[in-house]
Amino acid sequence: MFDFKNASKQDLKVEYNRIAREIGDDQFFTKQELNHLPEILMDGEQVLAFASGVMDNSTWLIALTDHRVIFLDS
């Protein structure tokens, strides 16, 4: 289990890159949202996948966790 809430920025980057490779997302435009994601995760909540996109000129991150689906525009 990966501890998103207490991981270093470098460890988060490695984990996000691992997830991105598995799902085929390039994380383009969502660096700010990915940096904010640990702040809104519950203790022990695991990110399973994510996707990025643009809507109304805003960049969005959609994250699938083991508890919920999160739509984040940071």
Image (cartoon, rainbow, N blue to C red):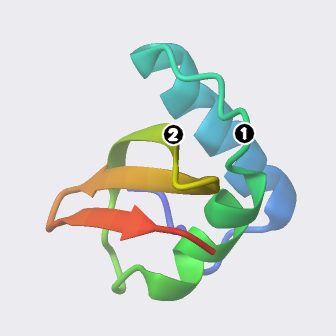
**Relative image position of residue 12 (x, y in whole percent):** 69, 55
Q: For the point 31% across and 70% down, which residue is it? A: 45
Nearer the camera: disc 2 or disc 1: 2
Q: Residue furthest left?
A: 67
Residue type, label 1: Val
**Which label was assigned to residue 36?**
none
**Relative image position of residue 31 (x, y in whole percent):** 76, 52
Q: Residue furthest front?
A: 56
Quadrant in the rendering for residue 50: top left
Q: List the residue tagged with mark 2.
A: 53
How many marks the image carries: the answer is 2
Provide the secondary structure element on which disc 2 rests. strand
* Viewer-proximal residue among 70 and 45: 70
Residue type, label 2: Gly
Q: For the point 68% across and 69% down, which residue is it? A: 7
Q: Earlier in the sequence, mark 2 or mark 1?
A: 1
Viewport quadrant of the N terminus: bottom left
Q: For the point 51% across and 40% down, which residue is it? A: 52
Q: Is residue 53 left or right of residue 64?
A: right
**Relative image position of residue 24 (x, y in whole percent):** 49, 13
User: How far, Cα to Cα, is label 2 from label 1?
Assistant: 21 Å
* Viewer-proximal residue among 70 and 13: 70
Q: For the point 75% across and 63% down, which residue is it? A: 32
Tag 2 and tag 1, C-beta contact below 8 Å? no
* Viewer-proximal residue among 72 and 14: 72
Q: Is residue 53 above or below residue 18?
A: below
Q: Is residue 40 above or below residue 9?
A: below
Viewport quadrant of the C terminus: bottom right
Provide the secondary structure element on which disc 1 rests. helix
Q: List the residue tagged with mark 1.
A: 14
